[in-house]
Amino acid sequence: MQHSDDQIIANALEILATSLRKPGITMSSPQAVKDFLTLQLATLEREVFGVLWLDVKNRLIAAEDLFYGTLTSATVHPREVVKSALAHNACSIICYHNHPSGVPDPSEADKRLTQTLVSALQLVDVRTLDHIIVGGMATYSFAEHGLI
């Protein structure tokens, strides 16, 4: 019985991932974004930082993992984020990364990085809508906590 339940869950998650990964999908629901990112990041054993590139109507252009780190950190280069934003012709973005510890609370470094990215992207007219941290099955949204 357990095996068939696991297979059903795996199939459902694959359907969700496939539908949310398609370019053109509107990222208007914060919960849909969190579910998508949780699906992608919850079980990773090292930190990954990425961006959802969005067009003027908040439709997904692409989801891109940009930086890979260790168990406790990933080095993010704002210059590379800006370059990628321009290459995708993005109007806005949602940043994301995971905490393999399972605790999604932002560190002071996470908060500083977010503000640096917001400022850098504003210079090229790209809005940062949110930065979501995934820790296991839990998430933390900078926008929901008034940090963006």
Image (cartoon, rainbow, N blue to C red):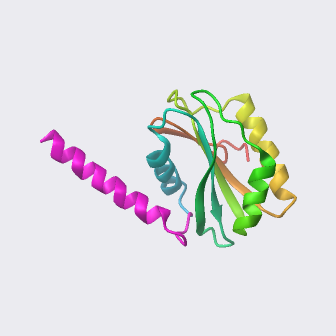
Quarter assignment of residue 108 = top right
Expressed as whole percent of the image width and height from the top left, the position of residue 61 reads 61, 68
- Where residue 62 sits, quadrant-wise, is bottom right
Image-quadrant location for residue 133: top right
Q: Quadrant of the N terminus?
A: top left
Residue reaching furthest left?
1
Whether residue 91 is visible to the viewer of this picture, yes or no, is: no
Q: Residue at x 64, y 65 (%)?
A: 54
> At x 51% / y 49%, what residue is drawn?
37
Q: In the image, is residue 30 part of the stretch drawn in magenta?
A: no
Query: Where's residue 26, x and y in %?
Result: 55, 68
| Side of 98 where 87 appears, left or right | right
**For the stretch drawn in magenta, what is the main secondary structure?**
helix
Q: Whole-percent x and y of residue 44?
A: 48, 37
Horizontal and vertical percent for residue 89? 73, 69
Q: Which residues are magenta?
A: 1-27
The answer to which of 22 and 139 lies nearer the viewer is 22
Residue 71 vs 140, above or below: the answer is: above
Please tell me which residue is depicted at 69% across the width and 67% down the height of the picture.
88
Q: Across the whole image, how many numbered discs are drawn on residues?
A: 0
Q: Residue at x 50, y 30 (%)?
A: 102
Left of 92 or right of it: where is 136? left
Residue 35 visible to an observer of this rendering: yes
Q: Is residue 102 left or right of residue 128?
A: left
Indicate yes or no whether the magenta region holds residue 6.
yes
Between residue 87 and residue 100, name the one nearer to us. Answer: 87
